Image (spheres, helix red, strand yellow):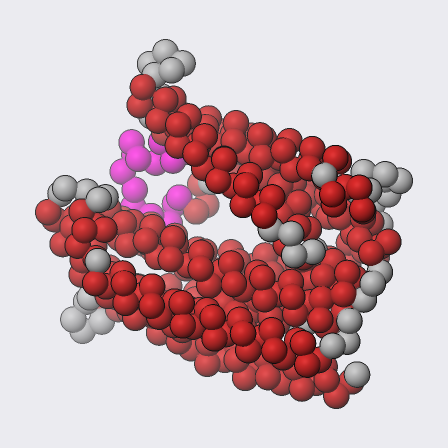
Amino acid sequence: MSPVVAHLHGAGRDDEVAGVLQQSFWLAMLLAVPGIVFLTHPGAVLGMADMDAAVEAKVREYLALLAWSLPAALFYRTFWAFCNALGKPRVLMGIGLFSLALHALLAWGFALQGWLGAPLGVAGCALSNILIGWLACVSAAAYLAFGPLGRRYRPFSNWQAPHWATWRELLRIGVPMGLSNLVEITSFTLIALFVASLGATVVAGHRIVANLSALIYMMPLSLGIATMAAVGQAVGAHDAARARATIRAGLILAGASSSVVGLLLWLSAEPLIAAYTDDPAVRAVALSLIIYVAIYQFFDALQTIAGHVLRAYRVTFVPMLVQIFCFWGIGLLGGAWLCYRWSTPLGVAGFWLAAALSLLLAAAMLLPLLRKVIQATESSL
């Protein structure tokens, strides 16, 4: 929805924005159905790992409970895309910060302190997620109904029935975007399944570094989302100069900030990891992996900005193919080969080395594609 709404807003066609939002809500409702089925029946994915039976039971319990929050998560995601496309992210930040603080409190109380009787463990964390998900959804609905965007766009007035032509356009752009997100996320999260046979210490060290990597990724991701919205509005307004200036600014800001953060991560690796665990074996694993995260930050930032800008131009299919090849082909398959089958198996470090190579290759492929798309768009104006 973000590229479509950004184009409409940039072109001054704000009267069409509410209809796109409503069709997106219909799609969110529809997509919740297979999502719930997947979360309640995750055997196909869990079967990929040699997982301890007790751990698998907890994972299944957590996912089954989490299914109750999926409709709320998809509705909120629709609201999230709508606000970002219009350049109004502050309400999202407010809801997010409040949700984070409340989630930390509820998860601690339900999982560890037994607020509902006995401590619920992983089920308590899932219950907290459900409550937070629906609270965020209701907060977003209230803002849409009574806030400044609601007064301007009236998203709940003159509600439209499902409209296939709009669905087709949203799916044409959105399905490759969703698959790209899936590929990028799973290229890291699935590593934990693939290295499960190496033992709990390796998995724990990997998860610490993966968590730090996810936190750091928020910087280029946020800049990518902002760049996509600004470029989408510029493209909708047929303002090629503004689009180019925005793209340049996004690449410079993301590349520079990610490089600095990568350096800081490397310099502060020991105290950061010590904050996660006091187990010396887990610390050793995490310290051996963190160099890869520090190195690939620059390339990750460039490919993130390039991918989001291509979405602003409504080009999503080819970037999806690039990311499938890089993140699943090089990152996961190449990582598995380096981990287990190379002449000198690297263990979990093989996956992180392959991840760094995959991000470098993704940037090398997406940036030239972006240049061609910009030139083709400008020549058609």
| Near-viewer residue (279 or 62) | 279
Q: Toward which corner of the image does residue 258 lie, by quadrant?
A: bottom left
- Measuring 74% from the left and 45% from the top, which residue is drawn there? 149
Which percent across, then down, holds residue 135? 58, 30
In this picture, residue 183 sits left or right of residue 23: left
- Measuring 64% from the left and 62% from the top, which residue is drawn there? 229
* Relative height, residue 53 to residue 234 (above, below): above
- Measuring 39% from the left and 27% from the top, which residue is drawn there? 105
Which percent across, then down, holds residue 278? 14, 42
| Quadrant showing the C terminus | bottom right
In this picture, residue 259 sits left or right of residue 203: right
* Relative height, residue 169 to residue 313 (above, below): above
Q: What is the magenta range?
A: 46-64
Please tell me whether residue 48 belongs to the stretch shown in magenta: yes
Which percent across, then down, holds residue 63? 46, 35
* Relative height, residue 282 to residue 346 (above, below): above
